[in-house]
Amino acid sequence: MRPAVLPPHRAQRGAARLAAVLAAALLAAAGAWFALAPSATMPDTTFTSIQGEKIDASSLRGKVVLVNFWATSCVTCVQEMPMMVETYKKYAPQGYEMIAVAMSYDPPNYVLNFAQTRDLPFIVALDPMGAIARSFDDVKLTPTSFLIDKQGRIVKRYLGEPNVAEFHATIEKALAG
């Protein structure tokens, strides 16, 4: 027996339907990926800075905190870093803190060199086993950042470089709250 062969117009419609179904599934998955429950809170984790200092998440309560997952090999991460430095300098006096968490695959000597040569003013932390990334919804893509309010609630997740005006407005709202 010969396999059934669809006429070209029916095969194209079938392929188009399949593409539409796959696109809808991907959009739904992406929506779930970016959605955060309004009551999501910062995980109870401990950050270890490149100087070896331990920072418990609970010690950050009362501050607006940005936890930024990045890597020295990430072009967008490197590109956004000057903006992150300026944002930190602008808002730190008002109670803003930033922790730049290097991904587990980033060699610690690369992270240290990057932080020193660019004089990063905020906390730079290592995550050699990936535990911190896992605690923040298993972050795998960089840059991914979480803005956390004074009560420890995650108010916004950013994937990629944020729009500066919107980012600063969200920080200001969190600082005022």
Image: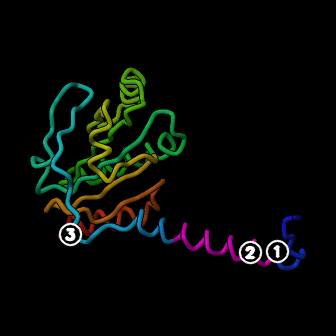
Asked which secondary structure carries label 3, the reply is loop
Quadrant of the image occupied by residue 46 = top left
Label 1 Cα crowd, 10 Å radius (few <14 / some 14-19 / many 20+): few
**Can residue 80 be found in the magenta stretch?**
no
- Distance between mark 1 and mark 2 Cα atoms: 6 Å
Q: Position of residue 68 (x, y in %)?
A: 35, 47
Q: What amino acid type should be assigned to the residue bearing mark 1?
A: Gln
Residue that mark 3 sits on: 39
Q: Position of residue 107 (x, y in %)?
A: 41, 24
Quadrant of the image occupied by residue 173 = bottom left
User: Between disc 3 and disc 1, whose residue precedes?
Assistant: 1
Magenta residues span 13-27
Label 2 Cα crowd, 10 Å radius (few <14 / some 14-19 / many 20+): few
Of labels 3 and 2, the one closer to you: 2
Whether pointer 1 and pointer 2 mark residues with C-beta atoms closer than 8 Å, the reply is yes
Q: Position of residue 39 (x, y in %)?
A: 20, 69
Q: What amino acid type should be assigned to the residue bearing mark 3?
A: Ser
Quarter of the image where the N terminus is located: bottom right
Residue in the image at 49% along x and 71% along y:
28
Residue 124, label in figure? none
Residue 12, label in figure? 1
